[in-house]
């Protein structure tokens, strides 16, 4: 009997281990699914609603990078303790991913209560965390779904919560979203766009368009920024605001970017040699150490001079993995490629990034330029940026210029470069070449006069 009892106890211990997250002591992915499946079975005859949710820590990776993985583990353990303490005796919280937690509320019957509960969890997690002698702060995003029908299974409920979480993350930090039918339709549309985009990239159907960048003083074109454009035979013209985030999230951005750079450099070979080509790198490309090799391989294949290429990166892209981004930037600058910081002022730790990285150019975000004529703070911010760049020896381009008065004010402040609809909208390679030929003829006539 003792042997049998001992064996049974060992089996139970092994089962507990298989269902437990070793870092936090919470249940793991298997425990959570088991709990939800049991609750669905219990309510099969009378499907009373209940809520499930997935909570994701916002920006946890930069904290890990800043404080170290040991501190990151300590913070996760503190998060787990706070979440567990907030649960009543009927509810469950489990850790289902690196910085993802799932909760089950058997006695929550409405979207309003689920939202309120989720907001309470976000509030609980917003208090500072002890990291040795320092403190850190976190925010979280939550997606929820409700069980209404006996036809729903655990996978469907969790997938709905994940879809809601996706919408919450896209809305900004610290948001709660409860799943709706509209989200299901939106998710299906995203899938359709993703599938069509994969085919379009494989077939080389995504095209580069080019928008002029000018010297503000003389209004002479000095370069062009490459912008992605895509028209699908079934979906029609798909906005880059729609398809670029999908490409980034679904792992298509790398092949698409390589396709665009190849086409853009092939087109730019026919431009006057004093014009540069500006090209954007996405955040995911700044964590891929093959990015530099891909760029150099394309330049070699198309015969485009690296010294005529400018790479634009954003502060958000730098924050994902600063060490990786720095190495890629150094590799590119070593062969003469210039590096520009895009959308300056809209990210985080801007001044710190300027100290850590060596940028050749800074682009002032259109949010400041659009209000320069009527908003004093925007005017002062632009003046401060220009003074700082002069001290750092960096070129400056102001984006989003649409009116002559904006351009005149920027010239008055000493801004060297400008870009926006005032100087030209994005156009395809053929139209851009025609634009340059017309500009060249116009310059010849002016000199003759």
Image (tube, rainbow, N blue to C red):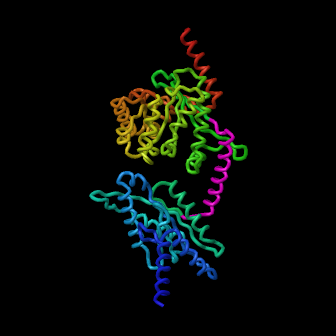
Q: Observer-nearest residue: 290 or 214?
A: 290
Residue 407 in the figure: left or right of residue 304 = left
> Can residue 408 be seen from the camera position used here?
yes
Q: Quadrant of residue 344?
A: top left
- Give the answer, above or below, for where 1 lies relative to 392: below
Q: Observer-nearest residue: 62 or 441?
A: 62
Q: Quadrant of residue 255?
A: top right
Residue 397, percent from left and from top: 45, 31
**In the picture, which quadrant includes the C terminus?**
top right
Residue 54 is covered by the magenta coloring: no
> Can residue 405 be seen from the camera position used here?
no
Residue 288 in the figure: left or right of residue 433 = left
Q: Which residues are magenta?
A: 178-207
- Give the answer, above or below, for where 436 lies relative to 386: above
Residue 198 is covered by the magenta coloring: yes
Q: Observer-nearest residue: 406 or 310?
A: 310
Residue 432, percent from left and from top: 61, 27
Task: State the residue at coordinates (49%, 67%).
Answer: 102
- Give the answer, above or below, for where 376 lies relative to 235: above
Task: State the residue at coordinates (51%, 43%).
Answer: 285
In the picture as drawn, the residue positioned furthest to the right comes out as 233
């Amino acid at each position: 009997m003792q042997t049998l009892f001992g064996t049974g106890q060992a089996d139970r211990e092994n089962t507990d281990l298989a269902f437990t997250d070793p870092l936090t002591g919470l249940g793991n992915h298997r425990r959570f699914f088991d709990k939800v499946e049991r609750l669905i079975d219990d309510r099969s005859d009378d499907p009373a609603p209940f809520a499930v949710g997935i909570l994701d820590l916002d920006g946890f990776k930069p904290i890990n990078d800043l404080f170290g993985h040991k501190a990151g583990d300590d913070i996760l353990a503190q998060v787990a303790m706070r979440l567990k303490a907030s649960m009543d005796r009927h509810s469950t919280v489990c850790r289902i991913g690196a910085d993802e937690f799932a909760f089950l509320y058997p006695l929550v019957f409405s979207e309003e209560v689920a939202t309120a509960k989720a907001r309470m969890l976000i509030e609980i997690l917003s208090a500072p965390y002890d990291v040795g002698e320092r403190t850190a702060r976190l925010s979280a995003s939550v997606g929820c779904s409700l069980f209404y029908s006996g036809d729903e299974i655990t996978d469907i409920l969790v997938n709905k919560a994940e879809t809601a979480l996706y919408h919450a993350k896209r809305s900004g930090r610290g948001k709660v979203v409860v799943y709706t039918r509209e989200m299901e339709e939106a998710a299906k549309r995203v899938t359709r766009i993703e599938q069509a985009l994969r085919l379009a990239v494989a077939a080389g159907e995504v095209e580069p368009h080019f928008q002029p960048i000018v010297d503000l003083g003389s209004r002479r074109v000095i370069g062009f920024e490459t912008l992605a454009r895509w028209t699908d035979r079934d979906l029609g013209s798909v906005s880059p605001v729609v398809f670029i985030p999908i490409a980034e999230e679904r792992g298509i951005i790398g092949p698409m970017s390589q396709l665009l750079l190849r086409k853009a450099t092939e087109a730019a070979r026919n431009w006057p040699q004093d014009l540069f080509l500006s090209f954007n790198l996405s955040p995911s490309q700044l964590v891929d150490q093959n990015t530099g090799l891909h760029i150099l391989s394309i330049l070699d294949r198309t015969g485009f001079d690296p010294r005529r290429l400018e790479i634009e990166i954003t502060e958000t892209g730098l924050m994902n993995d600063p060490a990786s981004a720095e190495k890629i930037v150094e590799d590119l600058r070593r062969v003469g490629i210039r590096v520009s910081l895009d959308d300056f002022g809209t990210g985080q730790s801007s001044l710190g990034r300027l100290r850590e990285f060596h940028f050749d150019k800074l682009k002032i975000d259109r949010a400041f330029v659009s209000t320069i004529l009527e908003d004093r703070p925007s005017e002062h911010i632009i003046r401060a940026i220009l003074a700082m760049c002069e001290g750092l020896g960096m070129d400056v381009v102001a984006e989003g210029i649409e009116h002559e008065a904006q351009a005149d004010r920027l010239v008055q402040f000493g801004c060297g470069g400008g870009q926006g609809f005032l100087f030209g909208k994005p156009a395809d390679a053929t139209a851009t070449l025609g634009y340059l030929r017309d500009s060249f003829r116009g310059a010849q006539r002016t000199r003759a006069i």
